[in-house]
Structures are given as structure tokens and as C-alpha cells.
Image: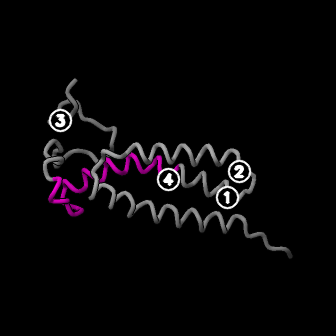
């Protein structure tokens, strides 16, 4: 019986990448807020584009997972800001003024807005 390790290797790499992105989002929000969200976008898109042209299955999978995780991280970065406002994570004392517009009852979903909620966007 021949064993094939490709799937297990990809699963392990995926687990590590997702595990590393979680503290990355927390640290990035703490030190810089959400103003550099676009770095997740740029690096995520570059990673996904590179995944299309890399022939090796494991490396291509790794690049795809990195790209998808970073793109997902954009929403998590904005949700992290709300988690900090709710008191679930420590707030950077140098950036207290950035949390004024967030209502404690606001949904963590970055795109969810209740129509009559005080934290809703005004257009």
C-alpha cells in the first residue's frame, strides 16, 4: 500500500496559515487600526495570482490559502475593531479616539448595518 501525503501536508499548512493570521489581525488592529487594510488586499490578491501560475501543487495550494486567508482577514480586521470596543480585546491607548463612532451593540459583521441603529452609516 502506497501512502500519499499531499492532502495531509496541505491541511497542515492551511491550519498553520489560519492560525498565524488570527494573531496577525489582532496585532495589526492594535498597533495600526484599520488604516492598512489594503495591505491584506494587495498581498492576498498577489498570492492568489501566483497560485495560478505555480506548478507545484503544495506551493500553489499554500499561496491560495494565504491569499484567501488575507482577504478574509480584511473583514476580520474591521470586526476586531468592534471586538476591542466591546472590551473583548485590549485597546491601544494611543488610538482611543478611533473607537468613538462604534456603538457597543453593533454587530461584528463588517457589512451588517441595522437601518435605525445609531452606528449605521449616514449617506
47 lies above or below 112 = below
Q: Provide the secondary structure element on which disc 4 rests.
A: helix
The residue located at (37%, 57%) in the rendering is 25
Residue sitting nearer the eye, 58 or 43? 43
Q: Kindly identify which numbered label has been placed on residue 117.
A: 3
Q: Quadrant of residue 101?
A: top left
Q: CA distance from mark 1 to mark 3?
A: 45 Å
Q: Nearer the viewer, mark 3 or mark 4?
A: 4
- Residue 121, relative to residue 76: is it above or below? above
Highlighted range, magenta: 68-95
Name which of mark 4 and mark 1 comes first in the sequence. 1
Q: Are marks 1 and 2 in contact (CB under 8 Å)?
A: yes
Residue wearing tag 2 = 54
Mark 4 vs mark 2, CA separation in Å: 18 Å
**Which residue is the site of mark 4?**
69
Reply above or below: 10 against 101: below
> What label does residue 59 carry, if any?
1
Amino acid at each position: 500500500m502506497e501512502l500519499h501525503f499531499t492532502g495531509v501536508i496541505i491541511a497542515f499548512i492551511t491550519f498553520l496559515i489560519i492560525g498565524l493570521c488570527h494573531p496577525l489581525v489582532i496585532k495589526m488592529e492594535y498597533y495600526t487600526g484599520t488604516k492598512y487594510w489594503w495591505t491584506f488586499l494587495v498581498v492576498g490578491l498577489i498570492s492568489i495570482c501566483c497560485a495560478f501560475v505555480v506548478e507545484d501543487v503544495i506551493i500553489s495550494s499554500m499561496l491560495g490559502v494565504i491569499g484567501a486567508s488575507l482577504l478574509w482577514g480584511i473583514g476580520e480586521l474591521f470586526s476586531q475593531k468592534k471586538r476591542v470596543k466591546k472590551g473583548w480585546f485590549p485597546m491601544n491607548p494611543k488610538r482611543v479616539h478611533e473607537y468613538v463612532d462604534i456603538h457597543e451593540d453593533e454587530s461584528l459583521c463588517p457589512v451588517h448595518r441595522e437601518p435605525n441603529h445609531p452606528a449605521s452609516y449616514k449617506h
